[in-house]
Image (spheres, rainbow, N blue to C red):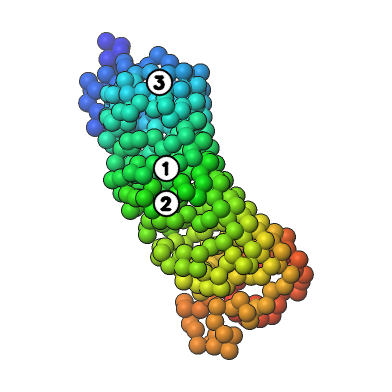
Amino acid sequence: MMEAFLALSCLLLASSVGSQDLSYEAMLQQLHACPKECRCPPSFPHAVYCENRGLKTIPAIPPHTWYLYLHNNQIEVLSEQALRNATALRWVNLNRNKITSEGVDEGAMKAMSNLLHLYMEDNQLTDIPSPLPASLEQLRLSRNKISKITPGVFAGMDHLSLLDLQGNKLEDDSVTEESLKGLSGLVQLNMAKNNLKTMPGGLPLSTTQLFLDSNAIEKIPVDYFKGLPKVAFVRLNYNKLADGGLPKDVFNSSNILDLQLSHNQLTEVPRFPLSLEHLHLNNNKIKSVNGSEICPVPLNDLYDYFDDKGPRLQYLRLDGNEIKPPIPRELMMCFHLLRSIVI
């Protein structure tokens, strides 16, 4: 009787966190099926917490689990058997384990037709896990040992909006139009801290945020951003970009809002579009700033531009260069929306 009373109380309490779809019987089933190695709070019955338990294998997961936390363990294998009943999973955290590509069963994610977020950071993967659920929206695989992206691995993944591959071992021939085919809804791509020497090719037209910090990129093709009409945030900090690697109008063909080129080898401020709001150029080799040269429009024509059509720059960072005050008058005349400049 007491057990039934507690279960009913749990059901009423959990209704405030999205468990109203669970029947009384399903609630009892979920709580009773909780693995002994894990914690299943009655106040959040859709979640199973198995983190920091020293686990080497994944326990059998209850069928009504939406959120599964398995990070900070010693798991080496992502097995189909352990997850075969977890058809309702939406969020899985497997960060900081010891999972290898060979340890991912071919059908391990077959039952996860509702999965939205998959975290497998800080493991020992050498390839993208496959096949992935078509429902996936975020895939985080940073700090593994991934050196290739098998063509076709993202086929049908048009819901995936975030792909995080930073801190892996990707090289130029690993990232091609064929290898990224299927990512028609991609918004954010993070390939920072890899082994890229050139800008990745074949990126989806939908790409809005492109993070390529800490590679060895030396140049950007002249029409590169013409193929990325939606790109608004570009981070290329800690690369090997010099003036000769930036064609004169390489950024002017885009609608970039935030451009980060810190810690490179630039001696001049590159030309940038009217739309740009934040520009990071700190820790380069820039000696001077000519406001009339970098202004996106001729200074004499500035009054012909309304506020909503003129230069939008609000933040400019130039510290760590060889520039000395004062700030050029022409710079302030051109960028009248400038709120912060760091020299």
User: Which residue does the numbered mark 2 point to in the structure image?
Assistant: 176
Q: Earlier in the sequence, mark 3 or mark 1?
A: 3
Above or below 318: residue 106: above
Residue 227 in the image: x percent, y percent?
A: 41, 64
Q: Quadrant of residue 331?
A: bottom right
Q: Residue at 60%, 52% (x, y): give it.
A: 216
User: Which residue does the numbered mark 1 point to in the structure image?
Assistant: 149
Q: Indicate left or right for 161 with 246 as reference.
A: left
Q: Residues within 10 Å of mark 2 (few under 14, many from 20)?
A: some
Q: Quadrant of residue 279?
A: bottom right
Does the residue at mark 1 contact the one at mark 2 (Cβ under 8 Å)?
Answer: yes
Q: Residue at 49%, 40% (x, y): give it.
A: 147
CA gap, disc 1 to disc 2?
Answer: 9 Å
Q: Quadrant of residue 47?
A: top left
CA gap, disc 3 to disc 1?
Answer: 26 Å
Q: Nearer the viewer, residue 325 or 270?
A: 270
Q: Amino acid at mark 3?
A: Ile
User: Which residue does the numbered mark 3 point to in the structure image?
Assistant: 58
Residue 71 in the image: x percent, y percent?
A: 48, 28
Above or below 163: residue 98: above
Answer yes or no: is residue 297 visible. yes
Q: Amino acid at mark 2?
A: Thr
Q: Residues within 10 Å of mark 3 (few under 14, many from 20)?
A: many
Q: Amino acid at mark 1?
A: Ile
